[in-house]
Every structure is written in C-alpha cells, then in structure tokens.
Amino acid sequence: MKWEENVRKCVPYVAGEQPNKKNMIKLNTNECPYPPAPGVVKAMQDMDYKALRLYPNSQVAPVVNALAEYYQVEPDQVFVGVGSDDVISMAFLTFFNGKEPILFPDVTYSFYDVWADLYRIPYKQIPLDENWHIRPEDYKIPNGGIIFPNPNAPTGLLEPLEKVEEIIRSNPDVVVMVDEAYIDFGGTSALPLLEKYDNLLIVQTFSKSRAMAGLRVGFCIGSKKLIQYLNDVKYSFNSYTMNLPSQALAVEAVRDDAYFKEVTGKIVKTRERVKKELTALGFTFPDSYANFVFASHKSVPAKDIFMALREADIYVRYWDKARINNSLRITIGTDEEMDCLIDFLKKYLANRAE
C-alpha cells in the first residue's frame, strides 16, 4: 500500500517471556524475587484514589528530591523516567545526534541497537574480549557517544572504576552513558566521577534491587546541563510521563534503605551459593556481580537445557545469537527457587550422562 512507504519500520526489542502459570519458577527477566519495601505496601494501601482524577507532578519532583537526597546530589542533577528504558531512550534522542557512530559492546543489553535503529542513529558494536571484558582502547576512536552497562548484561561482569574512567576521560567531546541497572548487587558506582566529568550520565533503575519492575521507575544522574537538555526533550515529548501512584511508591522505596540493603544482601548471598553449586554441576560462567549468572555447561548445549527447564516450568533466558548461543542467563531467585533449579539440573544432567 502507498501509505506504507512513509511508515517508520523497526525491528522491535524482544523482552523475556512473561508466563503466568501456577507454581512456575520465573528466572528469565532479572526481577527481584522479594516484595517491595514495607513502606511501599503501606503507601499503596493508604493511597487517596480520589487524587487519580488529577494530573501527576509533571516534574516528578517527589521522586527527584528523594533520589537527590539519597545520592547526595542536587535535584537538578536528577532525571526520572518510566523505567530506565524510558530514560535511556530519551537520552539517545537527546544526545546522540552526531554524524559519527555511537559505540557500545557487541554482547550487551539488546535494546541499544533497537533505539539506535529507531532514531536513525549510526552505531558500531565493539567486541568484548575473549573473557567478555571491555577494552578501553577500543573506545578511543571517533564516535558520536558511548553507552555500556556496568555490570554488563547478560554477562554480569563488572569493570573496575579505573577502566570506566579511562573511557570517559578519553571521550570528552561526547556524552558517555554508564548503565548501572545492576550496580546494587556488587561493585562501585561511577557516581563519584560526576564531580570530574560533565559529559557523564549514570542510569539506574528501581526494577531490580528495589523490587518495583511493575511500576516502571528509572532515573539518571548527571551534570545540571545534561539534565536540563533531557528535560527539554521530555517536555517536548510528553509532560506527564510518570503516574501518581508510581511517584508516591517510588519515594517510599528510596526511604527504606535498611530493607533495600537487606534484600540486595540476600540476593548476593544466594548468588554466591548458586555459583558454587553450578560449578559442581559442570557449568562455567563469568564472575557475576549482578542478580543473575550467565552459565554454559561443559558438555550439554544451552538450548537443550533451556528447553528442558521450560518443560518443567522453570524459565531462564536464552538467545540464539552469535557468541552467546551456548549460555543461559539465570536470574537469582529465592533460596527455595534456586534449590528447585539445582535439583532439576542434577537429575537432568545425570540422565543425560547415562
């Protein structure tokens, strides 16, 4: 049809499967296995639903102020969006408008190239080394901007802050985004580098460590100038991006720091135990600092294990893509869920060996 000639055609991002089965074990989308903070639950119960007839705060000021206080920055250094995907998408639209390609790893969050294609941004995927690490020297080439996760997804590997700074320092003329969706499970945030680099944007999310994936809350912190540019684009796109309940509940999630640290501590403890048990079963994986493990078995193809687990209503993530098609990304669930996973794998692998 003639009108199709003017359609913006895209190959969309494919999210992890979202099954809804009784007694399933869902370890495929890196959600938190624990409920949100008690204050979040209470705020939801006490919410004045009559207020829903009104528009929410367009500046998301309650959340911005809570995050600014928590991370000890100024409110005009904080931008809040509807999940970190919204934040990153808005940042792509705002900052990546040059003629040179933007740079990001070849094995990374698979939404980056989708956004680049959507906004017609030229890009170059930089291969990770043979051990799944970023090489800073690979990012010292002409470019229109840089984004990379730390810890990386799906590998879980953490790059030291010195390496992160080397990339930022070597690219003063473009915006460098560090996607820290998993930083709360280990490692050091790049937040201290904001004092030295006005081109640095750090993105985080409430979906993983704060157990609020269903509410869609993400944010970034950067220089006042970067945040102002982001807000200019946001208010040219949609003034009321975050609903009132999400704003109210996000504030409570930030306030309960003790619960936040308790939950992340539980997940880290379970992750380290699961690493040992997977190793004993013949799996190898990068040393994850995230809330998942990216595992390959020494003799059984990943796709076979993925299908067997799925038949048992245990869901993990598998990609049939170059370099990663023999690995499974396994989210860290509760201890009970991980025990079920390990027990299944023990029986399955023993039967395969017969």
Image: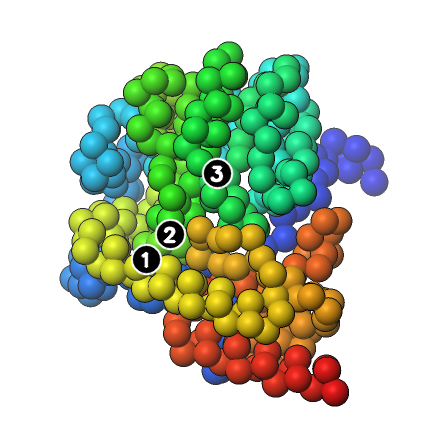
SS of the residue at dot 1? helix
User: Residue 326 or 22: which is nearer the viewer?
Assistant: 326
Quarter of image, res 258: bottom left
- Label 2: which residue? 185
Instruction: Give residue 321's position: percent from left, percent from top.
Output: 73, 51
Instruction: Give residue 301's position: percent from left, percent from top.
Output: 73, 67
Residue 264 numbered tag: 1
Mark earlier in primary sequence (2, 3): 3
Quadrant where the N terminus sits is top right
In the rendered view, tell whether residue 287 sits above or below residue 46.
above
Quarter of image, res 325: bottom right
Instruction: Give residue 176's position: percent from left, percent from top.
Output: 49, 25
Residue at image coords 62%, 70%: 282
Q: Are marks 2 and 1 in contact (CB under 8 Å)?
A: yes
Q: Is residue 5 left or right of residue 65?
A: right
In the rendered view, tell whether residue 271 sits above or below residue 52.
below
Residue type, label 1: Thr
Instruction: Give residue 121's position: percent from left, percent from top.
Output: 64, 26
User: Residue 30 or 48: which is nearer the viewer?
Assistant: 30
Q: CA distance from mark 1 to mark 3?
A: 20 Å
**Nearer the observer, disc 1 or disc 3?**
3
Q: CA distance from mark 2 to mark 1?
A: 6 Å
- Report whether residue 29 is seen: no
- Label 3: which residue? 159
Mark earlier in primary sequence (1, 3): 3
Crowd rating for badge 2 (residues with CA inside 10 Å; few <14, some 14–19, many 20+): many
